[in-house]
Each structure stands twice: as C-alpha cells, then as structure tokens.
Image: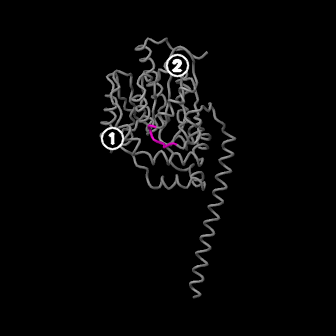
C-alpha cells in the first residue's frame, strides 16, 4: 500500500507541476501579446468587411496610372511578408497588401477559413476601402490559390496576375504533426518561446529581414496561430473550391514564378506550374534559382520585375495612362 501511496503522490506532483507550468505559460503569452500589440500598432487601416475589420496597407500613387496591385500571402502568413516587395512596387503602381481575418492586424472572424470565404472578405474589403479595379493580383503559395479563385468569381475586376510559387489545386498539402501540435499550444506561449530558432527560411523568423521584430511579434500571438490552424484545417474545402472554379484566364497578362529548391519533386511541380502559366494565352513561366519557397523574401527583385511586367502589359492592353511616379 505504501508503494501505491508514493505512486499517487508522484503522479499528483507531476500533474501539479504541469498545471503550474501551463498556467505560467498562459499568463506569459497573454501579457506578451498585449505588449506586442502596443509596441506594433497597425501600419495601415482597419476596414469593415462582412462583420469584422480587415487590415490593409496601401502605398504608391493614387489616381491615374492604374491598375492597383493587390497582394495576398501564404497560408498562416500576413501582409508583412510583402515588406521587401511593396515599397518598390509602390514606385510604379498603387500597391495594397492586406491581412486575412485573424492574421496580422485583422480581426478574428467566426466564418470558416476557406478560400471561398477569403475571396468574399477581400472583395468586401476592396469595395469598402475604395480600392477600385482593375486589379493585378499577386498571390504567394496559398494566396495564389485565393487570387485565382477571386479572378474566377470577379473576372471583370482582375486585369493581370502574378503567382509566386503558387499552390496548385491538384497537389493538396498536409501540415506535419509537429507543426499541428505547435499551433495547438499557442495559448501556452510555447511557439513564442521557440519560434526564434525554427523555420528560419520563413521571413517571420529570419533575422536577416529588417521586418523580423514586427513580423515575429504578430505571428506568435494566440489569435494569429489559432487562425493559421483553422486555415490548415480547411485545406480540403479550399482546394475543392479551386478545383471547381473556372480555369481559363483568356489572354490575361500572367507571370508564374516557380522556385527551384527541391530537386526531388521539381519535375512533378514544374508540370503543375507550367499548367498554371498555360491558363492564359499571355502566360509566362519563370523558374527562379537561388530561392526557397518565399521568393518575395529570398529574391524580391524577381517578384518586383514580374509585377512591373504585368502592370505594364495591363496598361498597354487596356490603354490606361502611363505610370504615375511618387513625387
């Protein structure tokens, strides 16, 4: 009996210790998140869109010289991921980067985090913020899926497109178990503690980026990580929505950027990216060397050049005014 008593006492001590650590982690996460919100206020503005507010940052010349460039980030990422691209694009076009609901500085949304819902959110945001079409949509990874669905649902608004190492609806991703567990531990502050030393190829955590402190601060918040988990949980539905959408882009100016960083899967992925470029008779595929998945971070000049190419093609095609440069 004495042995059982010691066993129960030991188990009780372990439970008490784990509970105390969890409580300490939750307090730490809540306090640190509050400080981060004060330290890094929204750089853009919050606009009502479908019952919640979305954050959008626009820069560059307003008025003539359209189209407007609108940028959508990868799954579980936010507008800061365009921080090395947007300032340069703003030199020759109006450029807007936004945060999907629950990411960056946008409000958390009760609606499902599917691609279709995000397209509806973005449309409401653009209308309510007064950002007028025509648009050149720029999408990275999952954002590439979103912008193609946007073009399918609102074809009269989209004049051009740049896909940055875009997801493809015929290759559905799966979140590794360790990352899934990491997202679930967000309320306890565990991702905040370890984020600095993991996933270094992502600009969220890369110390080389001048946007590192702000990006890391917003990306380890509980609401942000919970939204990232919800986006991943809705992958099946998002990819099904993309598969069911219109594929042809007619003669829309289109540049597809594909990063060659994984020789093992390169031939299969190249076939999918070539298919994306072929959806427009004016489509062009560019294989990008010396870059990981985040081309806009590793080779921002390639993305900037692609956006410029599409913007200029849209102006020629639509007979829009020449670019209006910032004073």
Asked if residue 292 lies left or right of residue 266, the reply is right
Mark 1 and mark 2: Cα distance apart in space: 35 Å
Relative depth, front residue between 35 and 118 = 118
Q: Which residues are magenta?
A: 111-116
Which residue, given by chain and number where applicable, does mark 1 sit on? 170
SS class, disc 1 = loop
Asked if residue 115 lies left or right of residue 101, the reply is left
Decide whether residue 77 is among the magenta residues: no
Relative depth, front residue between 270 and 237 = 237
Q: Main secondary structure of the magenta part?
A: loop
Residue in the picture at 59% in, 51% down: 192
Residue 85, x across and y down, in percent: 52, 29
In the rendered view, tell whether residue 115 sits above or below residue 325.
Answer: below
Asked if residue 30 lies left or right of residue 184, the reply is right
Relative depth, front residue between 226 and 198 = 226
Residue in the picture at 48% in, 33% down: 120
Give residue 260's quadrant in the image: top left
Give residue 60's quadrant in the image: top right
User: Quick one: quadrant of the C terminus?
Assistant: top right
In the rendered view, tell whether residue 170 sits above or below residue 277.
Answer: below
Which residue, given by chain and number where applicable, does mark 2 sit on? 92
SS class, disc 2 = loop
User: Which of the marked residues, 1 or 2, is nearer the chain's N terminus?
Assistant: 2
Residue 207, x across and y down, in percent: 57, 42
Residue 109, x across and y down, in percent: 55, 42
Q: Residue furthest front?
A: 51
Residue 128, x across and y down, in percent: 57, 27
């Amino acid at each position: 009996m004495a042995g059982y008593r010691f066993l129960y006492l030991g188990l009780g001590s372990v439970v008490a210790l784990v509970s105390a650590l969890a409580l300490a982690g939750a307090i730490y996460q809540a306090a640190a998140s509050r400080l981060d919100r004060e330290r890094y206020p929204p750089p853009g503005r919050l606009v009502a869109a479908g019952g919640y507010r979305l954050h959008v940052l626009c820069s560059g010349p307003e008025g003539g010289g359209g189209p407007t460039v609108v940028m959508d980030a990868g799954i579980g990422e936010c507008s800061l991921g365009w921080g090395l691209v947007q300032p340069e694009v703003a030199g020759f076009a109006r450029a807007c980067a936004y945060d999907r609901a629950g990411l960056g500085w946008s409000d958390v949304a009760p609606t499902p985090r599917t691609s279709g819902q995000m397209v509806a959110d973005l449309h409401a945001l653009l209308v309510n913020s007064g950002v007028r079409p025509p648009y050149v949509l720029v999408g990275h990874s999952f954002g590439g899926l979103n912008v193609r669905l946007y073009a399918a649902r609102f074809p009269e608004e989209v004049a051009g497109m740049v896909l940055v190492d875009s997801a493809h609806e015929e290759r559905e991703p799966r979140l590794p178990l360790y990352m899934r567990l990491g997202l679930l531990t967000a309320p306890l502050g565990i991702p905040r503690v370890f984020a600095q030393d993991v996933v270094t190829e992502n600009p969220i955590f890369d110390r080389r980026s001048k946007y590192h402190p702000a990006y890391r601060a917003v990306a380890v918040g509980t609401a942000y990580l919970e939204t990232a988990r919800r986006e991943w949980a809705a992958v099946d539905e998002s990819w099904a929505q993309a598969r069911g959408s219109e594929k042809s882009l007619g003669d829309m100016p289109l540049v597809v950027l594909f990063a060659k960083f994984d020789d093992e899967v390169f031939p299969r992925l190249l076939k999918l990216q070539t298919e994306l470029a072929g959806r427009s008779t004016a489509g062009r595929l560019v294989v990008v060397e010396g870059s990981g998945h985040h081309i806009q971070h590793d080779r921002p000049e390639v993305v900037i050049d692609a956006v410029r190419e599409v913007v200029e093609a849209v102006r020629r095609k639509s007979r829009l005014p020449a670019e209006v440069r910032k004073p």
